[in-house]
Amino acid sequence: MTLLLAEDDAILADALTAQLRRAGFDVEHAPNGAVAEYLMLKQPYELAILDLGLPMVDGLTVLRRARAARVGMPVLVLTALDSLDDRVAGLNAGADDYLVKPFDFPELEARLRALLRRTRAPGSGLDMGQLSFDPDARRAFVRGVPLELSPREWLLLELLLSQRDRVVTKEQIGQAWAADGGDNGSTGSIEVYIHRLRKKLEGSGLSIRTARGLGYLLEAEAPAAP
């Protein structure tokens, strides 16, 4: 999940970049509005976080120019400007969401994932191997047979699929569960759900591999030798 972070506060930008990367995002940082505008117009990102108080070119101008150029990526405005007029101006300029500083990271992550789900084309899935996964309809199938998944199993599978062939940490899993309104789960409970999901994915051509000390990754099983 590629993400542009336009934020001029270096300390906040460093902290956010680290948290977002741990959450599975591939982050590129723009320290001012000129760089943010250039990157938004030239690089294909899946979404962007945009501060309004950027130097050189302010965030509203960057957003208006990007929308005028038909840049369609979802944009979340992250700013200290919290008046009703500021919110209306940001949304009218083309923002898809508006979050005021200070904020809690789990809420930011939940909003980003909601934007990704909302802007995904209808019917587009995260298919892999013999698994068909439709996040919009919240349905998953292995070889055409529907999977019965609990809410936690669903979130876990969605996270593993979105980060296919990359390690998903237990911290990321806990954050995804917490962002959905539950607790973040103990190490033991995560291992239980991983075990259950492995059983349900049998016959899909996929496996959940444990990266010891790091987390888990979803990968295609090697074909059987002839």
Image (cartoon, rainbow, N blue to C red):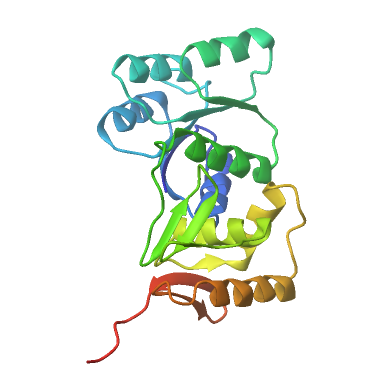
Going by the picture, which residue comes out furthest to the bottom?
Answer: 226
Residue 214 visible in the current orientation: no
Q: Position of residue 180 (x, y in %)?
A: 69, 47
Q: Position of residue 140 (x, y in %)?
A: 50, 57
Image: 100 above or below 226 = above
Q: How many marks?
A: 0
Q: Position of residue 142 (x, y in %)?
A: 45, 66
User: Which quadrant of the view contains residue 190?
Assistant: bottom right
- The quadrant of the picture occupied by the C terminus is bottom left
- Residue that appears at 56% across and 26% down: 97
Image: 104 above or below 161 = above
User: Which quadrant of the view contains residue 46?
Assistant: top left
Comparing 167 with 130, the one in front is 130
Relative horizontal placement of residue 206, taking residue 179 as reference (left or right): left
Going by the picture, which residue comes out furthest to the left?
Answer: 226
Relative horizontal placement of residue 209, taking residue 81 as reference (left or right): left
Image: 189 above or below 179 = below
Relative horizontal placement of residue 53, taking residue 163 as reference (left or right): right
Comparing 97 with 7, the one in front is 97
Going by the picture, which residue comes out furthest to the front?
Answer: 145
Residue 49 visible in the current orientation: yes
- Residue that appears at 76% across and 53% down: 182
- Residue that appears at 45% across and 22% down: 55
Comparing 128 with 111, the one in front is 128
Q: Position of residue 103 (x, y in %)?
A: 69, 36
- Residue that appears at 32% across and 14% down: 68
